Amino acid sequence: MHQVQPLMAEKCSRFALDNYASSMILAHTHPSGNIKPSDRDQVMTKRIIETGKLLDIKVIDHLIVGNPGYFSFADEGMMGDTKVLFKDYKQVSII
């Protein structure tokens, strides 16, 4: 399994805290076009979810964008016990 940079969870959490976020959606691209999550993607997602729990910041989804299409961790049931309905949110900001 790939080693994940420990600072990635810290950077995501810091960004969310600095912007007073109560939740976040992670997203990145796979330039190869392959939308299948790597082992590193999966480990990073779990680490960020756990860090978010400590800070009371809910991670709603992690999207991998490729060509064509995308992969959604939430759609595939890979977000652990995190379940969120968008109707529960009055405002969504993309920063």
Image: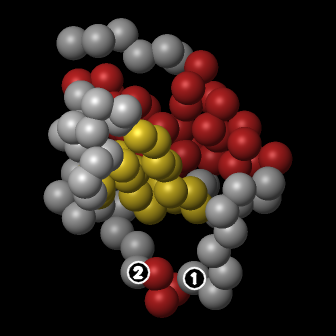
User: In terms of depth relative to the viewer, which is nearer, 48 or 76?
Assistant: 76
How many tags in the picture?
A: 2
Task: Report the coloring of the rendering.
Answer: secondary structure
Residue 42, image x, y percentages = 28, 34
Give left or right: position of 19 versus 88: right
- Tell me the number on the disc at residue 89: 1
Give left or right: position of 11 versus 49: right
Q: Is residue 22 visible?
A: yes
Asked which secondary structure carries label 1, the reply is loop
Badge 1 density bin: few <14, some 14–19, many ≥20, Cα 10 Å:
few
The answer to whether 44 is drawn above or below residue 49 in the figure is above
Q: Are marks 1 and 2 in contact (CB under 8 Å)?
A: no
User: In terms of depth relative to the viewer, which is nearer, 72 or 53?
Assistant: 72
Q: Amino acid at mark 1?
A: Tyr
* Residue at (50% x, 56% y) in the render: 25
Q: Quadrant of residue 41?
A: top left
The answer to whether 76 is drawn above or below residue 67 in the figure is below
- CA gap, disc 1 to disc 2? 8 Å
Residue 95, image x, y percentages = 71, 56
Residue 79, image x, y percentages = 30, 53
Q: Amino acid at mark 2?
A: Leu
- Tell me the number on the disc at residue 33: none
Q: Is residue 50 visible?
A: no
* Residue at (63% x, 29% y) in the render: 10
Give left or right: position of 29 versus 12: left
- Tell me the number on the disc at residue 85: 2
Asked which secondary structure carries label 2, the reply is loop
* Residue at (68% x, 68% y) in the render: 93
The answer to whether 89 is drawn above or below residue 46 in the figure is below
